[in-house]
Amino acid sequence: MLDLLRSRPPRTSLQAPLYTDPDMFALDIDGIFATQWLFATTDAEIPDPGDYVTVEFGTLSLIIVRGDDGTVRALHNVCRHRGARVMTDRRGSTARLTCAYHSWTYNTDGTLLHASSPGETFDRTCFSLRTAHVRSICGLIFVCIAADPPTDIDDLEEAVTPYLAGFDIASAKVATQIDLLEEGNWKLTMENNRECYHCGGHPELACSLFATWGLTADTVPPELAADWDRSLLADAALQERCDRHGLPWKIIEHLTDRDAGFRISREALDKTGESFSVTGDRLSQKLLGDLPDFRLGRTSLHVQPNAWFHGLSDHVITFAAYPVSADRTLVRTTWLVAEDAVAGEDYDVDELTYVWRHTNAQDADFVQLAQQGISSPGYVPGPYMRSEDQVEAFISWYTAHMSSHLDGHLDGHREGRAQA
Ligand code: FES
Ligand SMILES: [Fe+2]
């Protein structure tokens, strides 16, 4: 794997085995998903004590649960008796976590409450569910199973909080959530999300998202010149409005120079500029949090390695990619509206989800096509175009982190051999 990573020419897609080989997928789980902060869920999805969701990254399974004390914890979903998976539902609410195998029962803080017929020396306090690190940033819950999680999540929090705080995601209401199983490697899901080179395949999204996303003045092709000019005017108007309200709008990008790599921006939408609808009009009648205006464009956040988010004044959409196997990725999309927004009155779920339901389905098709082609003996890595800078940023981040993880292992083996 290290050879394949090191031999990648810049701005070139990866070699096929990195997208298709189950052994390489296992290394991805080890080198990326067991070492980095991962987006798991939102506070809005587990508002009350006992509420939980289970999330899986390959073989890694975690229970994210709100305890009786209101604290959110991430618990390894592995029974301390003989290792069975404890919670099997995707979400729920429970006072106790009970393993189905021999009924060991845990509190929502992970402590073992009950194990039948214990021996005399059995000490319950030694068998709590193992915990992982958990961090809520403006209502977005990240987890990390590493003993020493990357500390630059602090920088991410500091940078994104001024952009996200006004949405009050933690108090929002889940309008709906849709899981989509993409037939492709998780990296193809993320690569696809990082460019709009394929946005001609998104007719619904193209109504409100400028087709020039990801381009710069130097890279706009002649056929998009009119869209580019319109987007500049819309961005200037948005920036003036944000300045008036004291809201940040400048792009902050640290996609490759951090563990917790991210990019956040606030950019204008086309048409009436309020939301991701065909007309650009709002899709919910209630403003989120304490936002002052419906025309605040889209606040878009991308976090390495597995998530992206769009914040509109009327709703927030979170996207999480959970790797399932070398050629399958679960994409979970969650639509959040204001706490007091009423379905059927303030918003209609079908209308709210219309653009991204279609966009996600189209993206799933693109990812599947890519996986199919890359799995063929005819595949050779291809070049990233000028509008695919963020694809390169994602792959650079991945390559650097995997290489250093594998390097560390090799060093360990070498030291072991030298000592032997
Ligand atoms: S493995 Fe869970 S109770 Fe036995
Ligand atoms: Fe897309």
Image: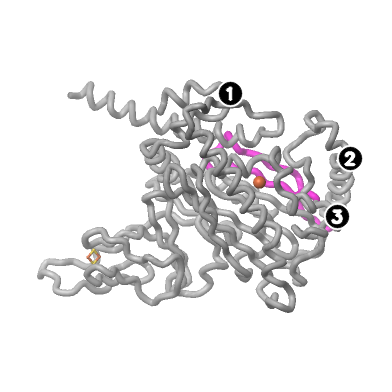
Q: Which mark is residue 10?
A: 1
Q: Residues within 10 Å of mark 2 (few under 14, many from 20)?
A: few
Q: Amino acid at mark 1?
A: Pro
Q: Residue at x 57, y 56 (%)?
A: 137
Tell me the residue that label 2 is attached to.
226
- Magenta residues, start to end: 244-268
Gap in Å between the C-alphas at discs 3 and 2? 14 Å
Q: Position of residue 279 (x, y in %)?
A: 82, 59
Between disc 3 and disc 2, whose residue precedes? 2
Q: Residue at x 74, y 65 (%)?
A: 314
Gap in Å between the C-alphas at discs 2 and 1? 32 Å
- The quarter of the image that holds ligand 1 is bottom left
Between disc 2 and disc 1, whose residue precedes? 1
Q: Amino acid at mark 2?
A: Ala
Quadrant of the snapshot with the N terminus: top left
Q: Residue at x 48, y 71 (%)?
A: 70
Decide if residue 175 is in sight here: yes
